[in-house]
Image (spheres, rainbow, N blue to C red):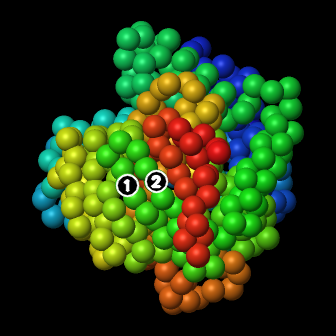
């Protein structure tokens, strides 16, 4: 028999549905560059279902074999903290992540839609938050290794969660805040041009030019200097700068981040020295960590403090041996469109594209010359870091200068007052 299915409800009128359609198309065509017959594994907040549906439609129009979504829900997350036994916080669904790893090994593409309430867990026991995060990070390792190794094409984009919108625009009524955040997402994702796909091609070309210049310099280290910051980041042996579109090991050229303004590479895990102060708060696993200040010695953080969320920060650093070392350094001009909004997004996907940043934890194997052919041990021998985490936090601003340091010790201006020199 035939059963008539009614159309699913649309999101609040605060979100421009035509722009949401554009975001889905750009996510599939530019972010993933999904290939005919390729499967797609998609994760998202339950509230982002209108975007999930559009992404699925765009994926199937592009010839997707099978789209499999996994949704998570704030209320269910909080129910765990309210009612679960204490031992629950040392558990994670390893079986799920092992299944994801198996899917990636079968060339399934990966898309993550982010946009959770950045303060969801701010009122919860920080010990439980840290334990749950550590358990999840450890269980996620099989899937993360495929993503960090760039085995398959993957991409991340954003949805304007109401609680996120209220955090970014606290003085606006909720509907106006959602509309304002949606507009900021659409603009940062370069959807407002007549041809967003062509605009992304031009943007990728600019980022490739910048990466090419840095690769031509072959710097041994970068030196960051600014308020509270005097940091030398040694670069891994045989490192390679990347930015914008990149080719995954499966041969597909994709844009892992929508939006993106960064060029990035791999630091040497044992060659980071000095002090650095964060220039923006870090929103991590539902907690806000503010005014991070750390000191590195021989590549490892030996002192760490924060005005808020210090307990969470310390537990993150204790995740494993590599959690207190760097896996990424990225340069972003202060003049980037996201920076110029003047907004704090409380979301790493956006805030990391407003300022130069570093990342604790796992390195990207693709940021090495010939990285696709290197074994994990060879990557480690060149200075690449290993960890169950990868957490970006911002250290750039219009008060921070960056110099490149050559093997001979000469200094070359790279950034002045936060912009390209």
With 17 as the anchor, is 35 left or right in this view? Answer: right
Residue drawn at x 56%, y 89% as measured from the top left: 378
Asked whether disc 2 touches disc 1, contact meaning CB atoms under 8 Å apart, the reply is yes
The residues bearing labels 2 and 1 have C-alpha atoms spaced at a distance of 6 Å
Q: Tell me the quarter of the picture where residue 321 sits.
A: bottom left
Q: Quadrant of the C terminus?
A: top right
Q: Quadrant of the N terminus?
A: top right
Relative image position of residue 225 (x, y in whole percent): 43, 50
Residue drawn at x 78%, y 47% as measured from the top left: 206
Relative image position of residue 366 (x, y in whole percent): 64, 72
Q: Is residue 150 above or below residue 392?
A: below
Read off the residue under disc 2. Answer: 224
Between 419 and 350, the residue placed more toward the observer is 419
Between 398 and 144, the residue placed more toward the observer is 398
Read off the residue under disc 1. Answer: 230
Crowd band around label 1 with a 10 angstrom C-alpha radius: few (<14), some (14–19), many (20+): some
Residue drawn at x 36%, y 67% as measured from the top left: 273
Crowd band around label 2 with a 10 angstrom C-alpha radius: few (<14), some (14–19), many (20+): many
Residue drawn at x 32%, y 57% as measured from the top left: 275
Q: Is residue 421 above or below residue 300?
A: above
């Amino acid at each position: 028999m035939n059963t008539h299915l009614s159309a699913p409800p649309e999101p609040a009128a605060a979100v421009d549905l035509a722009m949401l359609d554009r975001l889905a198309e750009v996510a599939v065509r530019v972010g993933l560059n999904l290939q005919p017959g390729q499967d797609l594994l998609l994760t998202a907040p339950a509230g982002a279902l209108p975007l999930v549906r559009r992404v699925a439609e765009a994926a199937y129009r592009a010839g997707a074999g099978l789209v499999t979504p996994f949704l998570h829900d704030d209320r269910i997350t909080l129910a765990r903290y309210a009612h679960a036994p204490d031992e629950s916080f040392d558990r994670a669904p390893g079986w799920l992540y092992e299944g994801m790893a198996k899917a990636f090994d079968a060339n399934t593409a990966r898309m993550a839609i982010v946009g959770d309430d950045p303060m969801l867990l701010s009122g919860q026991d920080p010990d439980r938050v840290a334990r749950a995060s550590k358990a999840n990070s450890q269980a996620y390792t099989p899937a993360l290794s495929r993503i960090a190794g760039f085995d398959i094409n993957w991409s991340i984009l954003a949805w304007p969660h109401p609680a996120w919108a209220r955090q970014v625009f606290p003085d606006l009524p909720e509907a106006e805040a959602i509309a304002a955040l949606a507009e900021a997402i659409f603009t940062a994702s370069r959807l407002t041009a007549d041809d967003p796909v062509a605009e992304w091609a031009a943007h990728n070309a600019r980022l490739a030019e910048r990466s090419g210049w840095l690769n031509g310099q072959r710097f041994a280290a970068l030196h960051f200097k600014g308020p509270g910051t005097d940091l030398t980041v040694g670069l891994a042996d045989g490192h390679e700068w990347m930015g914008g579109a990149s080719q995954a090991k499966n041969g597909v050229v994709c844009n892992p981040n929508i939006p993106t303004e960064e060029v990035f590479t791999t630091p040497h895990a044992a060659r980071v020295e000095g002090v650095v102060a964060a220039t923006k708060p870090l929103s991590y696993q539902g907690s806000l960590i503010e005014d991070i200040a750390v000191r590195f010695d021989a590549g490892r953080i030996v002192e760490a403090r924060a005005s808020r969320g210090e307990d969470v920060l310390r537990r993150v650093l204790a995740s494993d041996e590599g959690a207190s070392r760097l896996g990424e350094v990225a340069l972003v001009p202060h003049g980037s469109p996201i920076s110029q909004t003047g907004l704090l997004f409380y979301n790493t996907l956006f805030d990391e594209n407003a300022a130069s940043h570093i990342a604790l934890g796992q390195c990207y194997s693709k940021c090495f010359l010939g990285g696709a052919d290197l074994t994990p041990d060879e990557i480690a021998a060149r200075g690449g870091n290993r960890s169950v985490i990868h957490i970006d936090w911002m250290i750039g601003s219009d008060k921070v200068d960056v110099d490149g340091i050559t093997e001979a010790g000469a200094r070359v201006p790279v950034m002045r007052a936060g912009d390209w020199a």
